[in-house]
Structures are given as structure tokens and as C-alpha cells.
Image: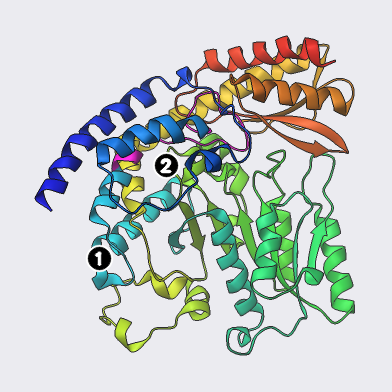
Amino acid sequence: MNEQVEEFRKVAHEAVDWIADYLADPRRYRVLPDMKPGDLVDRLAGAPPETGTPLGQLVEEFHQSIMPAVTHWNHPRFMAYFACTSSPPGILGEMLAAALDTNGIQWIASPAVAELEQVTLNWLRQWLALPEEWFGIIFDTASTSSLHAMAAAREFADPESHRRGGLGQLTVYASDQAHSSIEKAVVAVGLGQENFRKIPSDDKFRMRPEALRAAIEQDLAAGKKPCCVTATIGTTSTTSVDPLEEIVAVAREYGAWVHVDAAYAGTAAILPECRHILNGIEQADSLVMNPHKWMLTPVDLSAFFTRQPKILRRTFSLVPEYLRGTEDPRAVSYMEYGIPLGRRFRSLKLWFIMRHYGRQGVTAMLRDHLRWTSELDAKIKAHPDFEVVAPTLFSVVCFRLRGSDEANLRLFEALNASGEVFLSKTVLHGQTVLRLAIGNAGTTREDVNAVWETVQRLARTAV
């Protein structure tokens, strides 16, 4: 064992040096790899290893075989999907968590896992100005968090459902712009796609409260019972913001649980000037936001908050004798509030990030990104060959080349094939639209300007 530890010491020092160099200058890599599906499988396929390989050789093979297949999410010109970035303190926290390899299945299994999670989520709750009584728990992704919200909503609407199953009459509502994970959650908890209602959005891609009310009334007339309404703060395609206060008012009238999906844009609410996006949250029942999107945290870490922890616990608490622990009320066992029994020490990286940057450091980054996005929005609007096709609210610009969908697809493919930038796309009002998301900690105004220059240059050959 000692020989293996010493080998690890040498190779790990070299790996940390490489990581530091990578973070210092990721622009030397293509954002997207130049490869076809199956290339890495073909490169590595063969019989499974019979004998061991020294760590140093494995690192060499990582650089030679695996790195060429990596899409660099930590690249300053990775501008696809949503704002996403890692950071040195987050990576350090992840390394230490891996070394400890502690599993927080219950409080006694690792008090540090249980109690640091309470501390960091209480800090995050305060940064977001959520009510003091709200309870927080860490999951891996927003999809998992929303799944737990849906299960709790089912329990809220039908308190016996966790024992005997659903009866098929509970209905769920979300905007037609809501993330697909909401519909998946409906399926996963057994409510059925037939009981999921996609509520029409307005010309700014926001849920229409009057359409929500009409859908609920129609379901009530058919003998259905409203179970859950999901409002989205920062929709996937356009980052639109559903009118939360109005939605909560409608949902409360009919006794439905309100879940708020703020996985991406929730981080913006840390800024006092953006806190209004969560107006009405006090009367909602649950909220998800992902520090691994726009808060410097390595994937994965999703923060789930609820003002109904007793219902969440009632939904999932199932404690076999071998896992019974202390009755001390301060000994929180998170296994009783969700599906996972095993729990990684995710809060450690969040603690490193919040302590290292503080609120001031996080808000400074957010303000830079919002300012550069606003500047880009103005440049696109001023260009005769381009148009912005959705309100630019946060750090995502939805735009297109004036002309055909075919031209926009050619531009999209040319941009990503260049290796200089990675964008994503969507469809709005039946038209192909390009999405540019700013959010990497290493991104600068110069990166944003350079990407805009690349867009204009490649657009000349796309028309």
C-alpha cells in the first residue's frame, strides 16, 4: 500500500500542475473535439485488462486517447446550453471529498456530510433571501430535485399515495417552455403523461396565468384534482421568467403544490437588483437552483429547498433497523428526505467556493456576465443581418441570421466545427434560433467580442 501511495503522490503532483496549467490557458484547446461518434470506443475497444497499469502510464493514455474526445465545458468560449463553470476552490473541494470517500447515509456515518450540508445551504438560502424556515437538501441535478418536488406534491395532494399508489386523477401543470425534466418527473412518480398539461406561453415565452386557470377548471369539471404547478425562472430555450406571484395565487386557490424551477437563473437572485425574479417564492412550496450552472461549482450539485420538509420526509422516510440512529433532533439524516441512501460529500466543494469568493466575489462575476450579455444583445440588434428573437434577461442571447432556417443551421454547424466556440440552438415560433450563453468564470469581454466577430465572419458563407 505504501508503494501505491508514493506512486500516487508523484503522479498526483504532476496532475495538479497539469490542472493548474489547464485552468490558466484552456483556450489552446478546441472547444468541441474534432471526432465522429464511436471514435473513442474504436480507439479503446478490446479485451478488458488482465494486469494492472502504473498510474503514470494511465495519465499518459488519458492525454493521448481521452483528452482529444473531450468537449471543454471549462473553456471560456463554451457558450452552449447554460452558463456553466468550475473553479479552483471547487476542484480542491472535490479532490478532498474524493480522498475522504465518506458516505453520508445517516448522521453518524459522517457528521461532517450532514452538518456541512446544513451550513452551506443555510448560507445559500440567505444569499437568495428565502424564508428562514425553508429546508434545504443537496441532490445531483435539477432533474432529481424536481423529481422529489413532484413526489412531495403527490403526497401533498393525496396523503396516502406513497402507501397505495396514485389513483390517476392528479394533474400537473407547467409552461410549454418548461424543461423536459418536469414531464419526466410526472412519469417517474406514476402520475402519467396523460395528466400533464403544457400551458401556453405569451409572446415573451412566459406561462399565461389565465390559461393555467382555464386548464385547471377544465380538469376539475372532468373529475381531476390539481396536484402541482411548476413555474420556471429562466426557461431552457429563452431564460424567460414565469409570473410567479400570479401563478402562486392561482395554484393556492385550487390547493396545488407550487414548484419553482430556477435551476439556471436562480443564481441571479443573489444580486439585489435581480431578487425580484423570485417575488412570490414565500408562498411556493419548493425551489431548485443549481450552483453547478452559474455559481462556480463543479458538476454535480443541485440545491433543493422546500417550506414543506415534513411532507418531503413523510414521502421518503423508510428507515430499516440497521440504519436507526440517534433521536437527537439536531442529527439530520438526509436519507429520510429523498430517494438516495448513499450521499457524496458535495457540500464540501460548495463550502470552499462560498468561503473563497464570498458573496462579493460571486456577485462581481454575475454582474460582469450580465453586462457583457447586454452589450452583445445591443450589437446583434444593431446589425442589419441579425435579429434577437427573445428578451435577453440574464446571460443568454437568442438570435438568428435573418433568412432561412437552412442558413442558420449552416452557420450553427460552421461555428461549432470551427473549434473556436460552442453554441447551442433551439426552435422559437417555428424558426431555428442560435443560443449564446455566457457564464464561465474565465470568460472575458474580449472572448465575447471575439465570438461575435467569428459569428459575423462565418455568417458571410452561410447565406
The colour style of the image is rainbow
Q: How far is mark 1 from mark 2, CA to CA?
A: 22 Å
Q: Residue at x 26, y 36 (%)?
A: 56
Question: Residue 47: where, in percent of width, then height?
Answer: 44, 52
Compare residues 5 and 431 and report the one nearer the observer.
5
Residue range in magenta is 71-92
Q: Amino acid at mark 1?
A: Ser
Res. 297 mark: 2
Q: Position of residue 127 (x, y in %)?
A: 43, 45
Whether residue 227 is visible to the viewer of this picture, yes or no, is yes
Judge whether residue 287 is colored magenta. no
Instruction: Give the class, few, some or many, for how many residues have Cα within 10 Å of label 2's Cα (few <14, many ≥20).
Output: many
Relative horizontal placement of residue 49, taking residue 390 as reference (left or right): left
Q: Which residue has dot 1 on it?
A: 110
Q: Could you tell me which residue is drawn at 58 percent across and 42 percent down?
A: 265
Q: Among all residues in the image, which is located at the extreme left? A: 2
